[in-house]
């Protein structure tokens, strides 16, 4: 798929104020500082479409970007950032839950996982919640350029092994790097295939 246009449309915390219409939406979510904005910029070939920050927990809004004028990338707030405090985390969780469960246009959720880390409890619990609610999602292992290929493969396999303890069928997964555009073609092709069925 070729990205011909990508434009910011709206930011908000209220799912009822998201864009009207029936265009499919592909939402990106993950723990704070997992590389979400960098991945969105890499996929769209734009340097600063999504704002990147070295400060975790910066994205607190639902951000819609219209792609090729016929589908959306949605940048969701990161979860699990402890320094927000309990009430702050609850507020963000409410924004995330409302969007994922109530937004009919949400076609697929991309859950970003830092490929350098061991399986994290917060991610596994979030996946379990997605499964319980029947939310279609795919995993994107980020920051693959930070590891040697052998270590990367081992980490991904360890993660999948952990998932198999809970899941009969694993969700689709991709390995990505915003630095060298690894995984870009595969993720965009995946979106294109889904679009063919819903556009």
Image: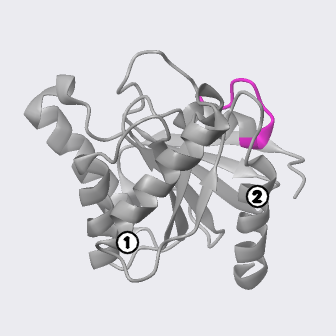
Residue 75 visible from this viewpoint = no
Residue positioned 38% across, 59% down in the render: 99
x and y percentages locating residue 177 in the rendered image: 67, 36
Residue positioned 65% across, 56% down in the render: 72
Residue positioned 76% across, 47% down in the render: 184
x and y percentages locating residue 20 in the rendered image: 56, 64
Callout 1 environment at 10 Å: few (<14), some (14 to 19), or many (20+)? Answer: few
SS label for mark 2: helix
SS label for mark 1: helix
- Residue at numbered disc 1: 164
The outermost residue toward the left is 86
Question: For residue 45: magenta?
Answer: yes
x and y percentages locating residue 122 in the rendered image: 25, 48
Magenta part of the chain: 43-50
The color scheme shown is: one colour
Question: For residue 2: magenta?
Answer: no
- Residue at numbered disc 2: 186
Callout 2 environment at 10 Å: few (<14), some (14 to 19), or many (20+)? Answer: some
x and y percentages locating residue 65 in the rendered image: 65, 46
Rendered image quadrant of residue 31: top left
Relative vertical location of residue 39 with respect to residue 104 in this rendering, above or below: above
Relative vertical location of residue 66 with respect to residue 50 in this rendering, above or below: below
Residue positioned 75% across, 52% down in the render: 67
């Amino acid at each position: 798929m070729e990205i011909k246009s990508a434009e910011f449309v709206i930011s908000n915390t209220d799912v009822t104020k998201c864009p009207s219409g029936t265009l499919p939406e592909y939402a990106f979510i993950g723990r704070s500082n997992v590389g979400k904005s960098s991945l969105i910029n890499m996929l769209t070939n734009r340097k600063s479409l999504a704002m990147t920050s070295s400060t975790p927990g910066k994205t607190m809004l639902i951000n819609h970007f219209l792609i090729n004028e016929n589908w959306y990338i949605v940048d969701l707030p990161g979860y699990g950032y402890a320094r927000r405090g309990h009430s702050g985390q609850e507020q963000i969780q409410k924004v995330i839950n409302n969007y994922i469960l109530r937004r009919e246009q949400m076609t697929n959720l991309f859950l970003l996982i830092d490929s350098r880390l061991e399986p994290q409890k917060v991610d596994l619990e979030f996946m379990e919640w997605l499964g319980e609610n029947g939310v279609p999602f795919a995993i994107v292992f980020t920051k693959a350029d930070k590891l040697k290929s052998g270590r990367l493969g081992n980490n991904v396999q360890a993660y999948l092994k952990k998932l198999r303890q809970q899941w009969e069928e694993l969700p689709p997964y991709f390995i990505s790097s915003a630095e060298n555009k690894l995984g870009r073609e595969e993720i965009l092709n995946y979106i294109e295939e889904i679009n063919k069925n819903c556009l």
